[in-house]
Image: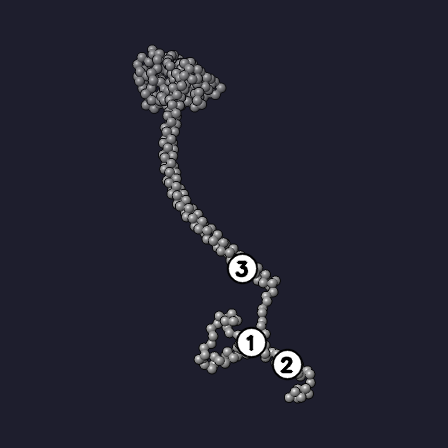
Amino acid sequence: MLNGFSRLPLHHVAIGAYFAAGILLSAPLSAQSPEASGSTQPSPSVQGDSTGQTDNNQSAAERPPFPVRIVEDPKKAEDAERREQRAEQREADDLIAQQRAAAAAERAADAAESQRVAAWWQTALTALGTLGLLYTLALTRRSVKEAGRSADAALAALQAAERTAERQLRAYIGILDISVSHVATGRSPRVAINLKNFGQTPAHRLGAKTEIEVMPTHAPVFAVGPLDDNHRQSIGPGATFNVTAETDKALTEAQASDLNSGSANLYCFGFVEYTDAFGHTRYTRFRHEIGDAGILSRRSMPLSAAGNDAN
C-alpha cells in the first residue's frame, strides 16, 4: 500500500489530510456532555422513539465543525443602549405627563366644584338683591306718590294763598256815594258819582261810563256807550274820583207827572273798568233808580235791585 500512496499526486494527499484532520477535530466536540458545555437542557431519554433520535442526529449534523462566538459591535451596542434609555425616558416622561394631567384634572374638578358653589351663592345673593331692589322700588314709588300728593297739596295751598293774597291786596273800585240834582220841570236831571279804590294796591287804566235817563218802570232799556281810552287814569289805594252825567233833554211836565205817580223812574246806570296790580282786567257795573212821590225834593238815589255786579 505504501507503494500505492507513493504513486498518488501530492495535492491529492494534502486534500485527504485536510479532511482527516477535520474529522478528528469534530469528534471531541460531539462527544462533550451538556454539563461540560454549560447547557441546562435535559439529556434525551434512552428509551426515546426513533423520531427523537433522528432529530438529535440532525441537530448534531447541523452544528458547525468549529466553535462560533458572536461578538457585538460596540458602536451598535452603544446605539442600542441609547435607544433603550431614550425609550425608558419617554415612558418616564409620559408617566409624569399623565400624573400631571390627572392632578390638573383633579384640580380642575375641585375648581369647578368651587365655582359651582360660588355660582350658587352668587345666584342666591342676586335673588336677595333683586328682592331688596323690588322692595326699595316699591317704597320709592310709594314715597314718590306721597311726595306727589304732598307737592299737589302744597301747590294747591300755594295757589290758594296766592288767590287769597290777591283778593286781599287787589284793587276794588266801587261807588262811595251818589247824588242827584236838577230833578225839576224844564231842567236836565244831573247825577254825581263818587268812586273809591277800596283795595290795597293801585288800579291802573281806570275808566268810567254812566248814563241817566227817565224810563218807564215796565220796560227799561239800559244801553251804555263805549269808554273813551284817552281819559283813563290810575288811582291808588283809598283814592277817590268823581263821575258826573245829566240827561240830554230837560224834564217835561209829563215825565215829572210819571215820576211822581211811580209809572216812570229816573235811572242812573253805567260801569267802571280797570286793571289791577296783578294784571287782571276788572269791572264794576252799577244801577241806581228813583221814582216815587216827593222825587223832586230828593237828593239821594238808592241802589237798584238788579244790574249791580263786579269781578
Which residue in the protein does label 2 denote?
17
In what quadrant of the picture does the C terminus appear?
top left
Look at 59% across and 79% down and name the residue there: 23
Foreground residue among 266 and 117: 117
Whether residue 152 can be seen here? no
Disc sitting over residue 114 in the figure: none
Residue type, numbered disc 1 = Pro
Labelled pair 1, 3 in contact (Cβ < 8 Å): no
Disc sitting over residue 28 in the figure: 1
Q: Residue furthest top?
A: 297
Question: How far apart are labels 2 and 1 at the CA level?
Answer: 18 Å
Which residue in the protein does label 3 denote?
87
Look at 34% across and 12% down and name the residue there: 298
Whether residue 21 can be seen here? yes
Question: How far apart are labels 1 and 3 at the CA level?
Answer: 46 Å
Residue type, numbered disc 2 = Ala
Badge 1 marks a residue whose secondary structure is helix
Question: How far apart are labels 2 and 3 at the CA level?
Answer: 55 Å
Foreground residue among 219 and 113: 113
- Graded by Cα atoms within 10 Å as few (under 14), some (14 to 19) or many (20 or more), the crowding at tag 2 reads few
| 1 or 3: mark nearer the eye | 1
Quadrant housing residue 267: top left
Badge 2 marks a residue whose secondary structure is helix
Residue 179 in percent (x, y) is at: 37, 13
